[in-house]
Amino acid sequence: MIQRFILAVQQGGFSTEEKRAALNAVARDTSSGFITIIRHLMTISGITAVVLLATMFIKPELADKFKHLSPFTTPEQLVEAEVPPPSLAMLMEAPGKPAAGNALHNAAYSEEDAKLLGSERQQKWVTNWLSKRYRVATDATNMLVSAAYLTAKDIKLDPLLILSVMAIESGLNPFAESPVGAQGLMQVMSKVHQEKFDEMGGVKAALNPVANIKVGALILKDYVSRAGSVEAGLKMYVGAGAFDNDSGYGSRVMTEYKRLKDVSAGKNVPTVFTNTSPAPVARQTETARSVKEDASEAKAKADPKDQVAAL
């Protein structure tokens, strides 16, 4: 194009119309070249954007990395609300008790709640993972996860710990019932904790997912507070407080808790593991109590003469 332009200028023997035609050809070729280059650049940019979006969809953690690299991201946006591990001081906070103290204490309390609940995106990750792992409809899982997070906010308990217990106890089946009478998502012994369901319509509410989560979480929090640690509280929750071990119950719950914590942090966690079918756990305390009561009744019914003879 440049050579054609120079040739058109240097050859003065051309008429004015011929020079004008040559200049028009140069201008036309130049503009056409720029348009072609811009078109190619836009095509490449579009393909690159599609590839990046597909990559971030497959690996959500890359979105956070790109966000950190962006010069338009403010420092506040870079702070990711993480779910903290269960804290004994947090667990011992009375449910429904208003925060005491001045405005600074209330502000800290609100920040603690925000960290406890995490972000909406984290809850969505947890919902999708639990839905795939336990083969429960996404809408139903979303309702259970939302109820667990709201309960966690009310009673100051880690929502991922509540969801871990739900997963191990019932596999997110709100109508699960064990041979000893443990019911619902959290496998609550409704006959033992009957008074806790009074404000929710009686023991029939044990199969109500929201009521079951609330009562089960309160029981779990009480056990953790009394036992002094999450592991010991889980041992009491499964009814093995008086036994040497809990048959691996606490380990399974804490393993599931770690997986959920990784999921909430945006990590890719498999949904299929060996021995993934969680069965409702029999409450050893109730079984031992029944055996003890039967032994006491048998002893009471014994003939006094036989007792004297035995002495």
Image: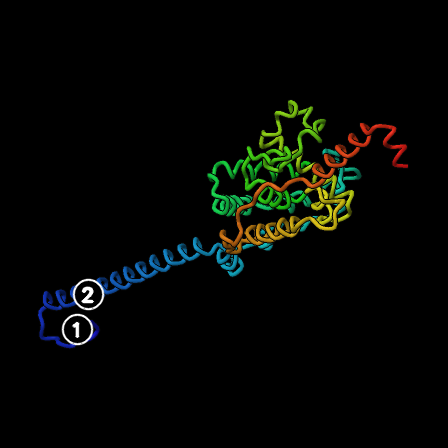
Q: Residue type at mark 1?
A: Arg
- Quadrant the N terminus occupies: bottom left
Q: How busy is the neighbourhood of tag 2: few (under 14 within 10 Å), some, or many (20 plus)?
A: few
Q: Is residue 22 visible?
A: yes
The answer to which image quadrant residue 236 occupies is top right
Q: Residue beneath label 1, please?
A: 4
Distance between the alpha carbons at the discs numbered 2 and 1:
10 Å
Residue 232 versus residue 127: which sits nearer the camera? 232
On the image, the x and y values in percent for residue 17 come to 10, 65
Q: How busy is the neighbourhood of tag 1: few (under 14 within 10 Å), some, or many (20 plus)?
A: few
Please give the label number shown on residue 23.
none
Judged left or right of residue 19, residue 205 is: right
Q: Is residue 104 visible?
A: no
Residue 138 versus residue 291: which sits nearer the camera? 291
Q: Answer whether labels 2 and 1 touch (C-beta < 8 Å).
A: yes
Q: Residue type at mark 2?
A: Asp
Q: Is residue 55 above or below residue 288?
A: below
- Residue, x 21% and y 73% (percent of image)? 2
- Residue, x 57% and y 53% (percent of image)? 259
Judged left or right of residue 168, residue 111 is: right
Q: How many marks?
A: 2
Q: Residue beneath label 2, please?
A: 29
- Residue, x 13% and y 76% (percent of image)? 11
